[in-house]
């Protein structure tokens, strides 16, 4: 027993957390050295003082009510539970803390043990993350300024470029709004910064250099050179828009702002419209072969389904060579829609396949091809919103097949 008591005393005396014991009247009856150091009091100086001595004055009234309620209905409470908490030292300095509570009875009197940890360093780290968010907002503002300058220089030369810049401006505004509301500043934030800084650099450099050169071609015989740089700017702006759309879609999904809104529509007409749109971005001699079997109508969110098909076809086009065939097959029967996209592309290794639906992941054999690593992740999230399932089969240098199975969303 004496050995056990010595061990308990050692745990109390040498614990790195502050430990404070109070009685049923909220008076401090015991503190360990770590607590004395934390609150900058001498040993035994706190004994007999109300626990509110260690709490900023503006919280006293509220804390007394919480304390009385706790003694009426005592329970153990773990670290980080509930509100942001603050403590104060002897000289009045305030600092953020985490507190966990335990309780016990002795001789019919209720005692409460508080374990207290200073989380100033953690709060500082959180502030640094918020500062990173501000830096991202500044990047967005700089890009908006760049767009305005480009529009001024080339607006009188091409309507196509002006429309592309306006679309980029709208996309940037939406991205800015998404970033302002972004709450998760840890892993996704750091990956976003790394990916954005890498992917934005090349198209932005192209836009800047071409915009600068356009101003030098002032003669009518220079029109061919002007057209060349306008095409380069337009292609770069389109690429930037794709990047921004991916980041924006991910932000909306993380915030839960995308909901399925089911309607009944003709899948044959729907599929034909999507394929007509994708035919515009095919590489030379590439073709899309489609087949649509079963009934005509299906009930689901056609907007999300359209985004899924466009994303899958875009991947098939991007990763397949010129002259390749891409197969798009759809079966609609018994309230189930089965859709598959098969390509003749470079394929995906077995090692990489298990990570393909993760955000920002890119297979080892496509690192030199532009992209964000968000496409399949977003597709999977859309499929989940539609209560569906997605699967993938692939072999290196033999192509990839992605299959989607959706149930009708009718009640």
Image (cartoon, rainbow, N blue to C red):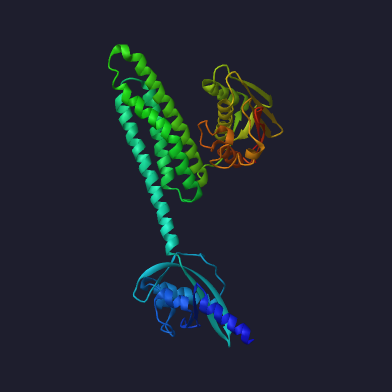
Query: Is residue 48 or residue 19 the one in the foreground?
Result: 19
Residue 146 lies left or right of residue 331; in this view the side is left
Placement of the N terminus among the 4 image quadrants: bottom right
**Location of residue 138 (image quadrant):** top left
Query: Is residue 354 shown to the viewer in this render?
Result: yes
Q: Percent position (x, y) of residue 274?
A: 56, 25
Estimate the x, y position of residue 229 in percent, counting from the top left: 37, 21
Task: Determine the image quadrant of residue 170.
Answer: top left
Residue 184 image offset from top left, x and y in percent: 48, 51
Residue positioned 62% across, 87% down in the render: 2
Left or right, 294 with reference to 120:
right
Q: Which of 399 and 270 is in front in this view?
A: 399
**Residue 354 spot, x, y in % from top left:** 64, 41
Check the picture and name the quadrant holding the C terminus. Answer: top right
Q: Is residue 240 above or below residue 95?
A: above
Residue 340 visible somewhere in the drawing = no
Report the side of 338 relative to 121 (left or right).
right
Quadrant of res 235: top left
Residue at 43% of width from left, 60% of height from top? Answer: 123
Residue at 58%, 80% in the rendered image: 8
Q: Which residue lies furthest to the top in this view?
A: 221
Tell me: residue 163, above or below residue 108. above
User: Which residue is at the far right?
Assistant: 334
Q: Nearer the viewer, residue 150 or 300?
A: 150
What's the residue at 39%, 28% (across, down)?
Answer: 206
């Amino acid at each position: 027993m004496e050995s056990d008591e010595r061990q308990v005393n050692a745990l109390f005396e040498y614990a790195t957390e502050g430990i404070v014991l109070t009685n049923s009247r909220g008076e401090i009856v015991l503190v360990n050295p770590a607590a004395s150091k934390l609150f900058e009091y001498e040993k035994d100086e706190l004994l007999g003082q109300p626990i509110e001595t260690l709490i900023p004055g503006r919280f006293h009234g509220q804390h007394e009510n919480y304390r009385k309620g706790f003694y009426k209905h005592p329970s153990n409470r773990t670290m980080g539970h509930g509100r942001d908490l603050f403590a104060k030292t002897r000289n009045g300095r305030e600092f953020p803390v985490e507190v966990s509570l335990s309780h016990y009875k002795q001789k019919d009197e209720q005692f409460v043990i508080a374990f207290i940890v200073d989380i100033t360093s953690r709060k500082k780290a959180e502030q640094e993350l918020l500062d990173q968010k501000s830096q991202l907002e500044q990047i967005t503002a700089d890009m908006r300024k760049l767009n305005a300058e480009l529009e001024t220089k080339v607006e009188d030369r091409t309507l196509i470029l002006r429309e592309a810049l306006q679309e980029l401006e709208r996309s940037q505004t939406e991205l800015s709004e998404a970033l302002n509301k972004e709450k998760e500043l840890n892993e996704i934030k750091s990956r976003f910064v790394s990916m954005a800084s890498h992917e934005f650099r090349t198209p932005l450099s192209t836009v800047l250099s071409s915009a600068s050169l356009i101003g030098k071609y002032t003669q009518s015989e220079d029109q061919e050179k002007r057209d060349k740089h306008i095409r380069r700017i337009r292609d770069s702006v389109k690429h930037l828009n794709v990047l921004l759309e991916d980041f924006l879609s991910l932000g909306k999904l993380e915030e839960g702002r995308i909901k399925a809104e089911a309607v009944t529509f003709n899948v044959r007409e729907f599929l034909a419209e999507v394929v007509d749109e994708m035919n515009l971005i095919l590489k030379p001699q590439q073709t899309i072969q489609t087949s649509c079997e079963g009934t005509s109508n299906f009930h689901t969110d056609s907007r999300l389904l359209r985004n899924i098909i466009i994303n899958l076809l875009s991947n098939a086009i991007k990763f397949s060579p010129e002259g390749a065939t891409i197969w798009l097959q759809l079966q609609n029967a018994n309230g189930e829609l089965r859709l598959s996209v098969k390509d003749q592309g470079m394929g995906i290794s077995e090692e990489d396949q298990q990570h393909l639906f993760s955000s920002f992941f890119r297979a080892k054999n496509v690192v030199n091809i532009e992209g964000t690593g968000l496409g399949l992740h977003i597709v999977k999230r859309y499929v989940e919103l539609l209560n569906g399932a997605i699967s993938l089969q692939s072999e290196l240098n033999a192509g990839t097949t992605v299959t989607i199975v959706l149930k009708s969303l009718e009640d």
